[in-house]
């Protein structure tokens, strides 16, 4: 999955030649924004500043220019980068929000914690109703392929498939099907001699508390 599907397009901005007072003003006048994109005079990205970072500048004179206290951006995303790339950058560098740019460094939006959650919801098909099953397989070549071959004959659509290594011998596999019928899915598994750990219906209104971000 690519970042382009999930980044937040709306953002507030300031310029590198603005005084620091402009940062304070922007955050004070709009309590809903958590970050500001900093632009160069040619409208390309210079960096971003988060609301939580204001404490780092509490002793800064408000007439100080932005470029005097904030360095050029080091970490950013292109819109065709993979979500996995974003996760790695954010995790390794303890970054909560990354700017997204095009190939010429013009800002397109922001990718942060909530956008990451939206991406995970999509991967796990949390925005679609269905039945979810978790099974445990031996962590050996061909185990997953055997499972998928069996399921492909049963005329059910797999909405998502997530695997997780438990130890050196076992792997958990969580599948979500496009069928809101626990009994039907359970019968398919039992008929084909497939054991499962848990099975339950997942309703979209319950799986995403608070609705969409």
Image (cartoon, helix red, strand yellow):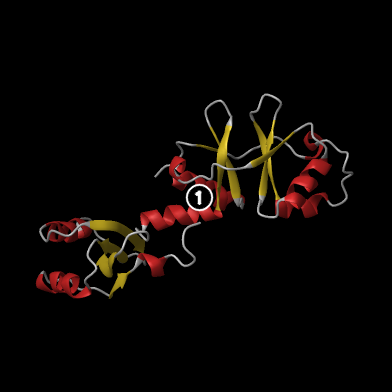
Of 191 and 51, which appears nearest the observer?
51
Q: Residue 71: x, y in percent?
A: 73, 37
The number of numbered badges drawn on the structure is 1
Residue 122 appears in which quarter of the rendering?
Answer: bottom left
Of 199 and 75, which appears nearest the observer?
199
Where is 66 relative to 179, above or below? Answer: above
Residue 162 appears in which quarter of the rendering?
Answer: bottom left
Q: Residue 168: x, y in percent?
A: 34, 64
SS for tag 1?
A: helix
> Along the horizontal axis of the image, is 88 left or right of 164?
right
Q: Residue 113: x, y in percent?
A: 55, 54
Of 193 and 52, which appears nearest the observer?
52
The residue under label 1 is 87
Q: Residue 136: x, y in percent?
A: 27, 69
Q: Quadrant of the N terminus?
A: top left
* Structural crowding at the residue carrying mark 1, measured as other residues with C-alpha within 10 Å and reported as few (<14), some (14–19) or many (≥20): some
Residue at the (87%, 43%) spot, across then down: 62
Where is 179 relative to 55, above or below? Answer: below
């Amino acid at each position: 999955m690519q970042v382009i599907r999930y980044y937040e397009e709306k953002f507030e901005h300031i310029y590198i030649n603005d005084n620091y007072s402009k940062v304070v003003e922007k955050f004070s006048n709009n309590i809903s924004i958590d970050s500001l994109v900093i632009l160069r005079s040619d409208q390309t990205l210079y960096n971003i500043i988060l609301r939580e970072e204001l404490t780092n500048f509490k002793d800064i004179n408000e007439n100080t220019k932005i470029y005097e206290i904030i360095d050029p951006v080091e970490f950013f995303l292109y819109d065709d980068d993979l979500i996995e790339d974003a996760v790695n950058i954010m995790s390794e560098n303890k970054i909560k929000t990354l700017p997204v740019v095009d190939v010429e460094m013009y800002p397109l939006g922001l990718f942060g914690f909530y956008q990451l959650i939206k991406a995970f919801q999509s991967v796990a098909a949390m925005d679609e109703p269905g039945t979810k099953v978790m099974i445990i397989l031996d962590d050996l070549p061909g185990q997953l392929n055997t499972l998928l071959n069996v399921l492909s004959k049963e005329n059910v659509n797999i909405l998502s498939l997530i695997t997780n290594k438990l130890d050196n011998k076992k792997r958990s596999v969580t599948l979500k099907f496009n069928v809101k019928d626990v009994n039907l899915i359970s019968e398919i598994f039992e008929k084909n001699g497939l054991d499962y750990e848990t099975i339950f219906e997942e309703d979209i209104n319950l799986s995403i508390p608070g609705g969409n971000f």
